[in-house]
Image (cartoon, coloured by chain):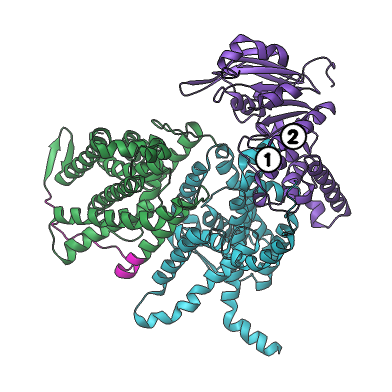
């Protein structure tokens, strides 16, 4: 039995690991979207975490746990000056700033000779195990699960429904938005460190536009109603390349098709299933719940 | 720091606010004593909702000041004002549609005295006890508003009258010091409106100050201790209901078609 | 110094043309159209393909690139924007759907052309150079500035002095009121998006000419500049986009002169951030900036 498992892991390890990382990334954008903050900077934070962690390992030989943490903290610290001045403005301004930030960082990484410039970093020690990724994912999922019915959870949901109402009920929306933004950066940074020590290279082209659109797709396609959605979305979209591998014989480049399908799925979901794929799962459950409530309504209320 | 009991709780001093070229409020002054119902009436577009928006902090006045317990509200962000004990309802219901009625009320309570996430992470009994307390308080608020029976319904599934009452329940659950009601009985039947009127009167008796915007002039005159009349953003009359309703300026501007 | 000014005005004119389309859609629809950079890219690629493969003259290729972009604008409006008008969505639904469409357009180009840079054929454009004071100005640069200025002026005239233009402005002011007045809002919006995309495509052809080639990643490079320009100029303001475009062009050359060419792209980023911190409304913007 364990032989079979070991063999399974051998052939699918990179997929399993990538899935875990993408799930983390999906959750990193979930928190911000859940309180109405639109950001496209998470691929850049991923890159920040990757470079920080990889450089600390390779140049200063810091222990693994520490470099991962440092990657996350650096990203979180960078997110603070980005978001703080802009949170009082309309959300579109922060969205634009994050796009600008992402592009600026991409160009910075490309030109940063200390970190290899356009070639990036190679030879990062393989320190990440699959259980590192999934442990962090499990911890994050647990925190999000317990948060649902706490003040924070209620505040976030209220903010998502109606920000102005939430404020007049005493919720400090600016503080929550900032916390969500920084937490998202932290998680993305951690994912970056883990990814660097998994794929053993840090390539500046990995942290650009396409990556952040993917991350957004994981969260939106999966659904923002609960933390399970983004994880589901990450799983589904990450597995696309494997499903599409067979097209190579037809002369169709899998990269282009993958990008097209990813965009198509995102479009279809945002137009016709805005709650994401989880709503398809939720429907049977909530239908049952609803039926129980439909006692003959007392018209005297 | 408790202010002397005879000072008005809420005071607007010469408050003005314009939007583009329109002067929504111009030199408005009014006072609301604690434990009283103060009516705010006037024709459509007179600026009544603007005054409410200015008080709760969504808008800032161009000039003048708004004082609660002597504290300048117009310098504070909306969430701080809410934390001081100011609650409001809206002209068009703005409930959290996806949440149940009970949850809608709990949100407001949590903002004041909720648990911390650390307690939730370790399943702390303190957190669970707090949650139970909040549920009790929420249900009590729902009961006051007469909608306890639909506590587990989703807010968007409630009938119109239920939604209006849920708004009020949500606002009164945290025992506010000042309650701002924006046309709470709009669209209600006579009997439902009378129930709401009773509720408001009881709240005032318990010590809450209520600023009540209403088109139902009869209702306002019957439960308010004082009334301010607005027209085109200015105060045209202010004082006891009987006095105001006989003021010729008011009759002309607002009650004109009556008898 | 004058040479710098010439170069700055010249690249500024392309940024201005690109930004005008961007800000037009934002002004009328209140949507940040993230597919704008994709139609920009397609314009350049289509023109290039026609000149390389079909040996079309420059002017015809320019027209074709513009038309292709305009056509994509139809697709964009019908697929990404119109369905969302019929249902309530979040503030960012349209932004996300435009992003999805952009990804799809790019993927198609990637499939058809591959990721590599294509170059314009030599001699595609007469290489005459003129002398203007201390500066050398090529015919190409003159043409680009002229095209950009002419199209922007045409748009301005359309908006201010035609019935369609006043319909567009009415929809931008208050969509519901415009509908009540009998304006076919759906048609107006379609025209707006098509015009915006066509202008973006023209800018893309001009850009491809300047940088002597086109590839699928070109859109991202210019997107940051476009954002910087519309923020600088004020979102929704067409004169602002023009002004901002030229200012960015000049700022870029000044940055290169002062700090060296690797910092060229940093100029756009800095402009964007400084304006967001100091005056988010931009120079000529009139829309509300604060939240709720």
Q: Residue at x 20, y 59 (%)?
A: C120
From this view, report whether residue C126 is shown above or below residue B86: below
Chain in cyan, by letter, is A
In magenta segment, residue A229? no
N-terminal of the pair, mark 1 or mark 2, is: 1
> In this image, C209 relative to C37: left or right?
left
Does A296 sit left or right of B124 as displayed? left
- In the picture provided, is B235 more to the left or to the right than B1? left
Q: Characterize the local packing of mark 2: few (<14), some (14-19) or many (20 or more) Cα atoms within 10 angstroms.
A: many
Disc sitting over residue B164 in the figure: 1
Chain letter belonging to callout 1: B
Q: Which one is nearer the viewer's eye here, C53 or B154?
A: B154
Number of numbered discs on residues? 2
Residue in front for this viewpoint, B207 or C190: B207
Label number found at residue C241: none
The numbered mark at residue B196 is 2
- The chain identifier of the residue carrying mark 2 reads B
Is A263 above or below relative to B18?
A: below
Q: Indicate the quadrant where residue C154 lies.
A: top left
Q: Secondary structure at mark 1?
A: helix
Q: Position of residue A195 (x, y in %)?
A: 58, 66
> For the stretch drawn in magenta, what is the main secondary structure?
loop
Mark 1 to mark 2 CA distance (whole Å): 10 Å
Q: Colour of chain B?
A: purple
Q: Is residue A108 visible?
A: no
Residue B53 visible in the current orientation: yes
Residue found at x 62% / y 34%: B91
Q: Outermost residue, top direction?
A: B248
């Amino acid at each position: 039995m364990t032989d079979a498992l070991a063999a399974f892991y051998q052939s699918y390890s990179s997929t399993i690991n990538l899935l875990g990382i993408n799930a983390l990334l999906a959750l990193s954008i979930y928190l911000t979207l859940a309180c109405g903050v639109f950001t496209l900077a998470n691929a850049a934070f991923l890159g920040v975490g990757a470079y920080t962690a990889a450089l600390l390992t390779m140049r200063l030989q810091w222990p693994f746990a520490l470099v991962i943490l440092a990657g996350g903290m650096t990203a979180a610290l960078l997110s603070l000056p980005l978001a703080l001045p802009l949170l009082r403005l309309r959300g579109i301004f922060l969205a634009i700033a994050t796009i600008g930030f992402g592009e600026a960082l991409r160009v910075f990484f490309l030109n940063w000779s200390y970190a290899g410039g356009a070639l990036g970093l190679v030879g990062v020690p393989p320190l990440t195990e699959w259980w590192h990724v999934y442990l962090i994912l499990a911890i994050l999922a647990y925190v999000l699960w317990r948060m649902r019915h706490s003040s924070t959870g209620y505040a976030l949901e209220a903010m998502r429904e109606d920000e102005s109402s939430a404020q007049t009920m005493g919720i400090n929306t600016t503080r929550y938005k900032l916390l969500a933004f920084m937490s998202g950066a932290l998680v993305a940074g951690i994912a970056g460190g883990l990814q660097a020590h998994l794929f053993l290279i840090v390539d500046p082209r990995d942290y650009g536009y396409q990556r952040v659109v993917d991350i957004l797709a994981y969260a939106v396609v999966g659904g923002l109603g609960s933390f399970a959605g983004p994880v589901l979305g990450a799983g589904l979209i990450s597995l696309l390349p494997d499903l599409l591998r067979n097209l190579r014989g037809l002369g169709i480049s899998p990269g282009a098709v993958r990008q097209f399908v990813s965009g198509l799925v995102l479009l279809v979901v945002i137009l016709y299933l805005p709650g994401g794929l989880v709503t398809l799962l939720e429907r049977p459950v909530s239908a049952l719940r609803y039926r129980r409530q439909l006692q003959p309504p007392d018209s005297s209320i | 720091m408790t202010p002397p009991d005879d000072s008005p709780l809420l005071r607007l001093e010469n408050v003005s606010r314009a939007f583009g070229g329109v002067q929504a409020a111009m030199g408005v002054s009014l006072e609301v004593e604690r434990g009283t119902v103060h009516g705010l009436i006037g024709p459509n577009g007179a600026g009544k909702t603007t005054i409410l928006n200015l008080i709760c902090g969504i808008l800032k006045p161009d000039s003048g000041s708004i004082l609660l317990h002597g504290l300048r509200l117009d310098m504070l962000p909306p969430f701080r004002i809410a934390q001081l004990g100011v609650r409001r309802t809206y002209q068009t219901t703005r409930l959290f549609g996806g949440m149940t009625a009970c949850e809608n009320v709990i949100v407001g309570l949590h903002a004041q005295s909720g648990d911390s996430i650390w307690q939730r992470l370790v399943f702390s009994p303190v957190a669970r006890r707090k949650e139970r307390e909040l549920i009790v308080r929420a249900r009590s608020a729902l009961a006051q508003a007469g909608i306890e029976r639909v506590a587990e319904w989703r807010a968007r599934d409630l009938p119109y009258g239920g939604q209006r009452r849920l708004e009020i329940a949500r606002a009164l659950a945290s025992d506010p010091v000042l309650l701002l009601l924006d046309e709470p009985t709009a669209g209600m039947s006579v009997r439902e409106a009378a129930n709401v009127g009773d509720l408001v009167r009881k709240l005032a008796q318990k010590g809450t100050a209520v600023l009540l915007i209403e088109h139902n002039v009869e209702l306002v005159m019957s439960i308010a201790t004082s009334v301010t009349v607005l027209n085109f953003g200015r105060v045209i009359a202010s004082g006891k209901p009987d006095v105001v309703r006989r003021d010729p300026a008011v009759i002309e501007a607002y009650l004109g078609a009556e008898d | 110094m004058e040479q710098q000014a010439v170069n700055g005005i010249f690249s500024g004119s392309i940024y201005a043309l690109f930004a005008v389309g961007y800000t037009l859609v934002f002004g009328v629809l209140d949507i940040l159209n993230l597919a704008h950079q994709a139609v920009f890219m397609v314009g350049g690629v289509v023109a290039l393909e026609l000149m390389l493969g079909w040996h079309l003259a420059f002017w015809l290729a320019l027209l074709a690139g513009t038309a292709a972009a305009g056509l994509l604008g139809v697709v964009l409006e019908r697929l990404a924007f119109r369905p969302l008008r019929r249902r309530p969505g979040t503030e960012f639904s349209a932004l996300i759907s435009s992003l999805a469409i952009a990804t799809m357009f790019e993927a198609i180009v990637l499939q058809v052309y591959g990721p590599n840079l294509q170059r314009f054929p030599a001699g595609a454009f007469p290489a005459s150079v003129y002398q203007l004071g201390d500066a050398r100005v090529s015919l190409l640069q003159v043409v680009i500035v002229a095209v950009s200025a002419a199209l922007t002026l045409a748009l301005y005239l359309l908006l201010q002095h035609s019935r369609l233009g006043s319909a567009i402005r009415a929809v931008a002011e208050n969509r519901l009121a415009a509908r009540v007045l009998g304006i076919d809002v759906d048609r107006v919006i379609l025209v707006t998006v098509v015009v915006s995309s066509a202008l973006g495509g023209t800018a893309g052809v001009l850009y491809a000419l300047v940088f002597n080639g086109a590839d699928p990643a070109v859109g991202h490079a210019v997107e940051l500049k476009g954002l910087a320009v519309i923020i600088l100029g004020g979102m929704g303001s067409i004169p602002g986009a023009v002004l901002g475009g030229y200012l960015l062009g000049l700022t870029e050359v000044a940055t290169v002169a002062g700090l060296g060419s690797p910092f060229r792209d940093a100029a756009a980023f800095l402009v964007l951030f400084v304006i967001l911190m100091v005056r988010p409304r931009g120079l000529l913007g009139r829309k509300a900036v604060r939240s709720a």
